[in-house]
Amino acid sequence: MSRRAVAVRVEGIVQGVGFRPFVYGLAMRLGLAGLVGNDERGVFIEVEGGSAPVEEFLAALTGDPPPLAVIERISTGPAPVTGRRTFVIAPSAAGGDRHALVSPDTATCDACLRDLTDPADRRCGYAFTNCTGCGPRFTIVRDVPYDRANTTMAGFPMCADCAREYHDPADRRFHAQPVCCPACGPRLRFVGPGGGDDPLERAVRLLREGGVLAVKGLGGYHLAALAADEPAVAALRSRKHREDKPFAVMAGDVAAVRRLCVVDPAEERLLTGCARPVVLLRRLPGAPSVAPSVAPGNRWLGVLLPYTPLHHLLLRALGRPIVLTSGNVSDEPIAYRDDDALERLGGIADAFLTHDRPIHIRTDDSVLRVFRGRDLPIRRSRGYVPHPLPLARAARRPVLACGAELKHTFCLVKDDRAFVSHHIGDLENYETLRSFTEGVEHFRRLFDITPEVVAHDLHPEYLSTKWALDQDADLVGVQHHHAHVASCLADNGVAGPVAGVAFDGLGYGSDGTLWGGEFLVADLAGFERAGHLTPVPMPGGATAIRQPWRMAAAYLDLAYDGDVPEDLDVVRRNAGQWAAVVALARRGGNAPPTSSMGRLFDAVAAIAGVRDTITYEGQAAVEFEQLADPAVDDAYPCGLVPSGTRFAVPGAELVRAVADDLRGGVPRDVVAARFHNAVAGIVAAGCAWIRHATGLSTVALSGGVFQNLLLLGRAVTLLEERGFTVLTHHRVPPNDGGVSLGQAAVAAARGCLP
């Protein structure tokens, strides 16, 4: 039988996911000789044997890879026949440009869960059990190739038993870099009051007694309390300075989640997948085991399942759900270094359940919801990062996109791969700025990318913009809402052109004013503004964001031509400041005009009595969405007003319709629904205008306002009924967390030229 030899190159997420053991086992089963190894580009293979087995081997590489492997490309070429008779795993090769990808952190697999509960297994009850199919990856990697010496497990030499598993091709821990056991691996430690030697038992006792516990996770510290314990949750909320924003809840299994929320098949898929994000689910009325302070006044609950062995041990010992929220004070990055956590969380937590495995890069939990059976990310972080996204147009030079300010991420691009970072937070202080710059350096090193082009937002006061302007690189300024639409295009793997609808809170316009209710004709390289909400003053500037009643005052003053009915509740509630705020809006000094759809939602929410002030971004709009009756299908009329080659949307007309209905006694839930339906109608009318002018029949919807599922659903339905193809987000968030991808895609499409 004639022999054949083939050299194979496999690129993608193929390191740290059991790919070499898979290749080894496949070659042994087919009786082939050769080698497999890791290097900076991914996995290299040389295989030699009969033609038929070699062909079967090549087909199986893509047909049946390990579950966590993501193969981007396979290239093959002839190799010299050497006559070798064995197949081996070669030492990892270093040197050259790095192209290898690092796997995201992955939830504990079923096999390791069985070990965790098997009294006969030496890892029974061990909080750091892992294998090639699960465990820490991105958060422990210092460098590539992904070998133990390049991770934070380097300080834990393997014992003889672990080394035997690591070197045994038949073992599922074969070349699992974080492999360890109680004899050689990380150990738990309890810091706090109470006697006893077992850290887990002490932690469980503290939670049962109503304490707040700081728990060291994969990407940082969490703060935990029993979800049903109102005094404990209220204490956590007070100490964390988080007045209203909902907490996430971790439940032990899907059955426990179903006792709290409605769970459809797509949501269950998300909950139980290897990424294990927080999933926003519809709460069951009167569901037990959740205290009022967990998610006050909210019809949705963010729920996640255990994703580390420690979580499983903790939840099984407790037998009930816990609040599990980021270990930080509001507006600060999550704590991930032990000394920093003890200092920053010492005033919040009553005790700490920690361990001695270092976290190299902080990573918050991801947050998703489901829209029409598809993922809709709200925050893309642990479990998804650093998996790259492909660009429709490859970059000719390496790019760093610096993102926006709120919900900040950055993005590095090399060729056609876009590496969107983990969630950094709101880039408004030194701590988050340092987290941003440290993250950039880590990604640059990990993926061997030296940016020659830096893309940034146009807003001159964003810290990300100021940092970008100090870099020694070619600069590309990208308008905020163009970046939103480009992000949606990149998310869907297309280049445009499209009718782009970008609705959000605020963004710096190319004319120097504040935009946010935008209709664009856009592709990746550029855009034209086709329409927008009619600008309205923001009395007090940023204060109007924190106090939505100010936007109500400005809108009502326009809607009623200065003669605002005094019997409106929002006027009565704010009577002491009303006249001064209206005067400020009219003068226009500290009242910049904005076309923001987010500010229109704020105004209407305040008029409807949802709230006059907020404690977290978008709160009024979130609660206004939940107020709406989904059974209502009629809408307020609101036409488009031609303005040259563009159109304007007179939001004041909607405000007057809302106010008149409320004065007439129409229920608030009906008013809220009619408003949502009207905005959906505006989306459809604006896109019809663009189609008439340009012939474009594809629409991209982006911006934080489209996190509103009621609005998104109604808008998509109307657009599809009118024959449009509609693009929405499913891999990066529609909010500012996706802006960096849009900036990067724009820079790449422009040829990376300033």
Image (cartoon, rainbow, N blue to C red):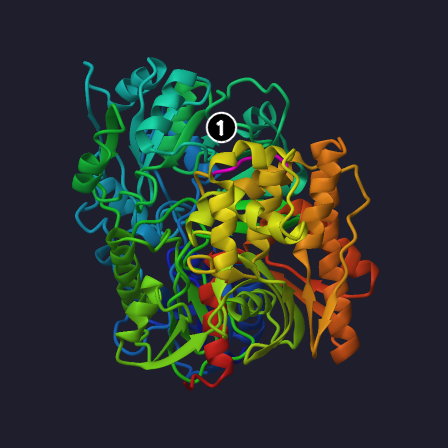
Query: Does the image show residue 440?
Result: yes
Residue drawn 48% across the image and 63% down it = 507
For label 1, count other residues whose C-alpha is less than 10 Å away and answer few (under 14), some (14-19) or many (20+).
Answer: many
Secondary structure category for the residue under label 1:
loop
Q: Is residue 266 left or right of residue 343?
A: right
Q: Amino acid at mark 1?
A: Ala
The C terminus lies in quadrant: bottom left
The count of marks equals 1
Q: Nearer the viewer, residue 173 or 717?
A: 717
Quarter containing the N terminus = bottom right
Q: Is 610 one of the magenta-colored residues?
A: yes
Residue at image location 51% in from the left, 19% down from the top: 289
- In screen coordinates, is 465 left or right of 342? right
Height in image: 270 above or below 249? below
Q: Which residues are magenta?
A: 608-613
Residue in the image at 74% along x and 64% along y: 640
Instruction: Choose top left, top right, bottom left or bottom right for residue 328.
Output: top left
Q: Residue tagged by mark 1? A: 251
Comparing 670 with 585, the one in front is: 585
* 428 w.r.t. 496: above or below: above
Q: From this viewpoint, is residue 272 visible?
A: no
Magenta segment main secondary structure:
loop
* Residue 202 placement (x, y as % from top left): 26, 18
Percent position of residue 398, x then y: 38, 79
> From what the image shows, is residue 574 above or below residue 504?
above
| Residue that appears at 40% across and 23% down | 233
